[in-house]
Image: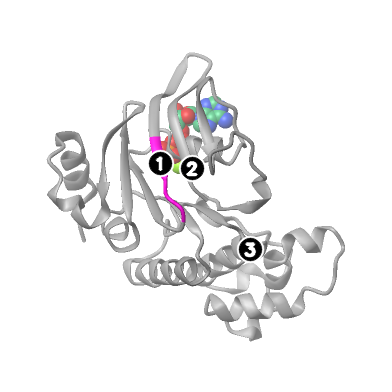
Amino acid sequence: MKIEIKNLKKSFNENLVLKNISLTIEKNKSTIILGQSGCGKSVLIKIIYQLFSFDSGFILYDGKSEVDIDKFSMLFQYGALFDSLKISENIAFTDFINNKTNYERKVLSLMNDVGLDKSIFNRFPSEISGGMKKRVALARALYKNPKLIFLDEPTTGLDPINSDKINELILKVIRKRKITAVTITHDIKSAIKTGDHYYFIDKGIIQDKGDCKKILKTKNKLFKSFITGASIK
Ligand SMILES: Nc1ncnc2c1ncn2[C@@H]1O[C@H](COP(=O)(O)OP(=O)(O)O)[C@@H](O)[C@H]1O
Ligand SMILES: [Mg+2]
């Protein structure tokens, strides 16, 4: 799905978070949203996902202002799993809470896709590692076969080796399934590796944008200082 955002503005009472955001999310591409903590990245994707309203501007989904948000999926920041539910129940969450029971094969196939051994099917989140939890959260996000997936800081809390593994996995999965991806990160290395296009937000507007492979060649001063501050590993 292609999404076009024009002159989007969003404030919470006196707090003007997004002043004027215009950007395009290309179909079947990986778009990266970069910016300092608190600049409004999560708010922006929640607006696109229609979890928040906005003040002015417009959003077109494949040229229309209406969209079936069931085509979207989100991997929330910290990817919270339900501690009291088994791994399988977490992955099949939407079916599980609706008392549907025949999800076993679908869950096993997804677990295979994200590199989880079937032996953890009946385990609980507290019994698996941080990297495995991310894989479970990704499998849950893929469960409904989304056309577009939002990934809010998908590698937060992981060490560099596990971050690399999760980034590679995400890339593999979105390419194979032809999913449009919108990823928030402040890890430049991840952006270069996993992104096609990037947008850098600061002070409520898009300050820089371009091809992820050329991030390090940017001439934009604000983005340059963000990159150096964010440290390249
Ligand atoms: N539900 C909310 N109600 C009021 N203010 C909010 C809400 N969600 C986010 N904000 C504010 O919006 C700003 C941007 O937040 P956020 O999008 O989470 O930043 P980040 O770029 O780190 O993801 C912050 O100032 C935050 O306090
Ligand atoms: Mg955020």
The disc at residue 3 is 2
The disc at residue 24 is 1
Spatial CA distance of label 3 from label 1 is 22 Å
Q: Tell me the mark number nearer the camera, choosing from 3 and 2.
A: 2
Q: Tell me the mark number nearer the camera, choosing from 3 and 1.
A: 1
Q: Amino acid at mark 2?
A: Ile
Residue 90, percent from left and from top: 69, 65
Spatial CA distance of label 1 from label 2 is 6 Å
Q: Quadrant of residue 53?
A: top right
Instruction: Please give the residue where the numbered disc 3 appears in the rendered image.
Output: 145
The answer to whether mark 1 and mark 2 are in CB contact below 8 A is yes
Q: Is residue 200 left or right of residue 66?
A: left
* Mark positioned earlier in the residue sequence (3 or 2): 2
Residue 11, percent from left and from top: 49, 20
Q: Nearer the viewer, residue 78 or 27?
A: 27
Neighbours of disc 1 within 10 Å: few (<14), some (14-19), many (20+): some
Q: Residue at x 32, y 50 (%)?
A: 197
* Mark positioned earlier in the residue sequence (3 or 1): 1
Residue 72, percent from left and from top: 60, 51
Q: Which residues are magenta?
A: 23-27
